[in-house]
Amino acid sequence: MSATPGHPHGPIGLFDSGVGGGTVLRHLRRLLPAEDVLYVADQAHCPYGNRPAHEVRRLATANVQWLLDQGAKLIVVACNTASAVALRALRAQFPHVPFVGMVPPVKPAALSTRTGVVGVLATPTTLNGELLQDVIQQWAEGVTVVSREGHGLVELIEAGHIEGPELEARLAAFLHPMLAAGADTIVLGCTHYPYLRPTIQRLVGPEVTVLDAGEAVARQVRRVLRARNMAHPRGSQQGRVLYATTGDPGHLAHQIARLGLPAGRVITAELP
Ligand code: DGL
């Protein structure tokens, strides 16, 4: 899969602390089927959400360097936590590399809420990061934002629990204050959480809108590739997905099947 960095034949590089990036990958496959995707899951260091910012920045740099060494032409930071604290630094460190990052979709939520109350569920690092605070300041003036840290959710999802009583009890405790405050829109600010969407939707009821940024990010990747003439020229042929993990490849292969993610070979990544 390797090619010169920035070359249209190179893969789209994508990273997350674990399987969360899969909720972005699904949209990428649908919108850009001809592209190869190289997805690194930094499962040896998962979760990122409770780590200090400088540590997440160091891990993010290592992921990006590894992806570039394999010839990635564009990097998707498919992790809200890494985007919150590292995206600016990554752009400065790798000025010639196009990056697409995640931000919890507070803007569409603020534009569409009828009650004027929006709930945001994310990791502590994302909630405290300036990226989210900037978006709230810029787009959510006059809207009440009720945020909660999704303590323990990433660990449960990584262990394969995307439903069940323990998960539901945790979710209910996080969602209750949002609903009690009148939220009619819930923003999922962590790429792991869309796996929980059916449970979340059931808990909040059909009248409440649940939003995540996966599709918007995939559309942005498509825009950037087109604008830079970097789309893969293979036409209607399907591209391949290659997964790499810093953890156990057997475990990741099992998770890919269980979560219904696009099929692909799984290798070990040794980060620099
Ligand atoms: N999927 C991640 C995010 O979007 C990472 C969460 C974590 O590792 O704590 O924030």
Image: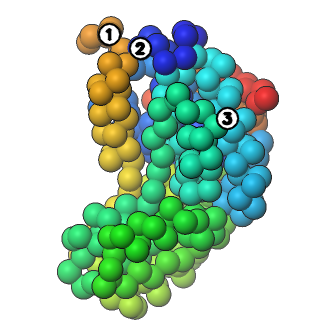
The residue carrying mark 2 is: 8
Q: Which of the numbered marks, if any, corresponds to residue 99?
A: none
Q: Which of the numbered marks, if any, corresponds to residue 63?
A: 3
Image height check: is 72 above or below 90?
A: above
Residue contact at pointers 3 and 2, CB within 8 angstroms = no
Q: Earlier in the sequence, mark 1 or mark 3?
A: 3
- How far is mark 3 from mark 2, CA to CA? 21 Å
Element assignment for label 3: helix
From the top left corner, tell me how far across and down residue 81 is, in percent.
59, 56
249 or 258, which is in the foreground? 249
Image height check: is 26 above or below 53?
A: above
Residue contact at pointers 1 and 3, CB within 8 angstroms = no
Q: Give the amino acid type for the residue marked by disc 1 in the picture.
A: Pro
Element assignment for label 2: loop
Label 2 packing within 10 angstroms: few (<14), some (14-19), many (20+): many
Quarter of the image where the C terminus is located: top right
Label 1 packing within 10 angstroms: few (<14), some (14-19), many (20+): few
Image height check: is 184 above or below 155?
A: below
Q: Give the amino acid type for the residue marked by disc 3 in the picture.
A: Asn
Q: Is residue 89 left or right of residue 200?
A: right
From the top left corner, tell me how far across and down residue 237 is, in percent.
31, 10
From the top left corner, tell me how far across and down residue 35 is, in percent.
39, 20
Image height check: is 84 above or below 242?
A: below
Task: Mark 1 and ligand 1: say if the CB distance to the nearest ligand atom is below 8 Å.
Answer: no
The residue carrying mark 1 is: 233
Residue drawn at x 75%, y 61% is 52
- How far is mark 2 from mark 1, CA to CA? 7 Å
Quarter of the image where the N terminus is located: top right
185 or 129, which is in the foreground? 129
- How far is mark 1 from mark 3, CA to CA? 26 Å
Q: Give the amino acid type for the residue marked by disc 2 in the picture.
A: Pro
Residue contact at pointers 2 and 1, CB within 8 angstroms = yes
